[in-house]
Image (cartoon, rainbow, N blue to C red):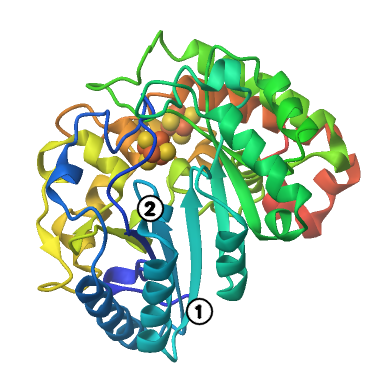
Amino acid sequence: MNAMARGGSPALDWIVLKVAQRCNLNCTYCYVYNRGDDSWKSRPALISDVVVAKLAERIVAHCAQYGLDAFVVELHGGEPLLLGKKRMQRLIDMLRQRCAPVRLRLILQTNGLLLDPEWLELFDRNGISFGISLDGPPEVADRFRIMRNGQGSTQKLLDKIRALRAAGPDFNRLMGSILCVVNPDLDGGKLVHWFVDNGFDAFEFLLPDGNYVNYPQGWRGVEPYRRFLLEAFEAWYAMGSAAPQIRLFEMMMMGFMGIKSPLDALGGDLRRLCVVESDGSIGVSDVVRICRGEYANDKLDIFQHPLDLHASVYRLAQIQQPCAQCQACPHFASCGGGYLPHRFDGAGFDHPSIYCHALYALSERMLSVIRRDLPPTLLSDPTTSLWTASLAE
Ligand code: SF4
Ligand code: SF4
């Protein structure tokens, strides 16, 4: 159901729930531990039953207020599997029982290192699909994805995935998508092929988090990201019907067809979701914390405030407004101005993304292949002229 909140904005229908604040990895680019926000240190390592029970109450009240019959809870961390199987099952049971009759969709994001057949069984039993973070082959990914002892983690993860796949179909059936943080030192095309060759048919590229006052680690300007994205897109598009799902590319191309992307990386409306920390604090998006200042303060919590108050307290309608440059940009439909935290300059968000140059070039390339490959009759057909008008030269 597409209910509307106050002021005609879409209602919040998604919570990122921090069930564990710690992680068994220490990725160098991690926005939780290594981008200047230390709030995780003062929160409980694991979420308590008291927080879960109050959250369920808030979800029920929120859904009743906005007429929602379905709601998404994304189990997140740190590393959510650190909660352990018994506590995870108890959390799931509490949420499902106390949120009924709201249909809860539960998903989970993990670094995958603690997965085992019993976790897969638990996910299967509870209708949970999961995503895994994997940045590519160990020799490059492990410069960033390191364990607490400084050793790389990727070969361990690949061995784990191989073993779980060998044990039966559950891993592939339950795994939704890979999250891959873009490494601009790599060839994007080769990386797309690496994922496909390793049996991954759905993955997502994330641009490393940073902004105009807190650039991503190793920043050498936006050009390497432009090159990476174009290489990845060319490889992906050339695969035709055999291409894997890459949400960033699919959503951007849908933008050209008049379908607004809900993806936060493409200017999706952040009023639709909030983060709930292990102590019950409510935040905008955990990545927005890299902007520090008021965006890293805990002003709200589920014990005192409703779930949707973050939208007005953090003035989301205002700060999400695209800047003048984005409003005038011919590629706003595909790019959306980028991800909100990537637009921050220390005072506000009235800028294009730090990745503007790369997103613009990618949009240009997408538009040119759409124009090249659409049947000419479609571009001149009056019944499709509304959406093809933006594609016509
Ligand atoms: S696995 Fe995720 S939460 Fe853990 S350190 Fe890496 S990026 Fe951070
Ligand atoms: S390409 Fe740049 S200017 Fe255009 S919408 Fe995206 S961020 Fe804004």
In this rendered view, identify the residue nearer to me: 373 or 391: 373
Residue 358 position in % (x across, y down): 52, 22
Q: Which residue is mark 2?
A: 82
The structure residue drawn at horizontal position 30% and vertical position 20%, both measured from the top left corner, is 215
In this rendered view, identify the residue nearer to me: 232 or 85: 85
Q: Amino acid at mark 2?
A: Leu
Residue 136 position in % (x across, y down): 61, 26
Is residue 24 in sight in this rendering? yes
- Residue 7 vs 256, above or below: the answer is below
- Residue 144 vs 13, above or below: the answer is above
For marks 1 and 2 on the same chain, the one whose residue lies earlier in the sequence: 1
SS type, badge 1: loop
Query: Whole-Å distance between the Cαs marked 1 and 2?
Result: 33 Å
The structure residue drawn at horizontal position 41% and vertical position 60%, both measured from the top left corner, is 75
Q: How many marks?
A: 2
Q: Evaluate if marks 1 and 2 touch, with contact meaning CB atoms under 8 Å apart.
A: no
Classify residue 375 as left or right of residue 56: right
SS type, badge 2: helix
Classify residue 197 as left or right of residue 42: right
Residue 228 position in % (x across, y down): 60, 18
Residue 187 position in % (x across, y down): 65, 15
